[in-house]
Image: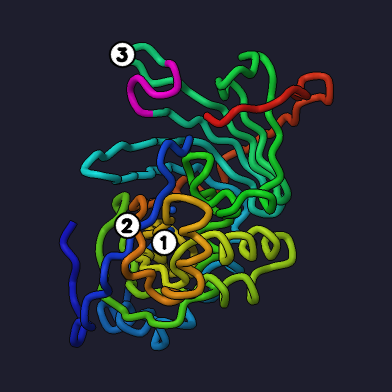
Amino acid sequence: MAVRRRGRRRAGVSAVAVGTAGAVGVVLVTATGCSGRGAAAAEEKVPRDPLRAVREAPDVLARSGTSSTVTAMEMTSGGTRVTIDGTGAFDYAKRAGRLKILLPEGASGAAVGQRRPITELITPDAVYMKNRGAGVPSDKWVRVETASLSDGNLVTSGATDPVSAAELLRGARQVSYEGERTLDGETVSHYEGTLDLRAAAKAASPHSRRQLEAAAKGFSTKAVPFEADIDERGRLRKVRHEFTVVNGEHDRHDAHDEHDEGGEGASGVAVSSTVRLRDFGTPVRIGMPESRDIYAGTIASP
């Protein structure tokens, strides 16, 4: 997709990538046609303040009702690259949604050439996973509190959910407008920059604060590069984050102390997480599991 540039392009942000090995684990905007003033009117719709446009995207999304979503998480470690794909839908008023995650071929006991699906229900406080494997009966759900995970469940379950992906943008600190491009047949404004996990946690809505506070403590880098596409209504249509997580709990604490901003020298897994939103207004029905359907036994690592 060709990008039309306006003005000078900022210096490229270094691609800091993060991920968790073996982890099981998006913002679009509609540009309406302009009549009368034509191109001049379109020019006036370009946000004059890229930082404000990005930081306000979470609030706009919260008022946007529902949408379908497509996720992709790419993890690279030691020359090996795997991709986890997801599809689903979210209700932004309830801050809840449903995703079907496809693990890489042969992962977690799946037969060679097959990709095991995991169903995930995401709520403000917890994620529920079905067909998780690792000794859990296939008809049972596993419930995990997101704030209890070292990354706030931004990558652990194989997808960064749309609400969390948007909330991260509250911590944007360096943003540049990179022109317009076409996404799903519509014109969107493209932004690039970096965000600070700690700033995002402080500015997050109450429902997301504990989750992002956990992420700010758990990731080896606090500065996260991102790209975001926003439509003329201010809705997030696509967002991509690049994280870095070091291997091992001991190394993680060392990284906090010695490599607070960039984590230089820390070895880990590179994770690029992309979330794409479309079909706003899609009906979303989320049936929560009964208590008897939630697995109460010991849960092994996936």
Q: Are marks 2 and 1 in contact (CB under 8 Å)?
A: yes
For badge 1, the amino acid type reads Val
Q: Dot 3: within a 10 Å radius of its alpha carbon, few (fewer than 14), some, or many (20 or more) residues?
A: few
In the image, the segment drawn in magenta is 104-109
Instruction: Please indicate whether residue 20 sits to the left or right of residue 206 in the image.
Output: left
For badge 3, the amino acid type reads Val
Residue closest to the eye, 271 or 268 = 268
Query: Which quadrant of the structure image shows residue 284?
Result: top right
Q: Nearer the viewer, mark 1 or mark 3?
A: 3
Of the two numbered discs 1 and 3 on the same chain, state the one appearing first in sequence: 1
For badge 2, the amino acid type reads Glu
Circle 1: element type:
loop
Of the two numbered discs 3 and 2 on the same chain, state the one appearing first in sequence: 3
Q: Vertical placement of 137 versus 209: above or below?
A: above
Q: Nearer the viewer, mark 3 or mark 2?
A: 3
Locate the N terminus by quadrant.
bottom left
Task: Please give the residue where the numbered disc 2 appears in the rendered image.
Answer: 186
Residue at mark 2 to residue at mark 1: CA–CA distance: 7 Å
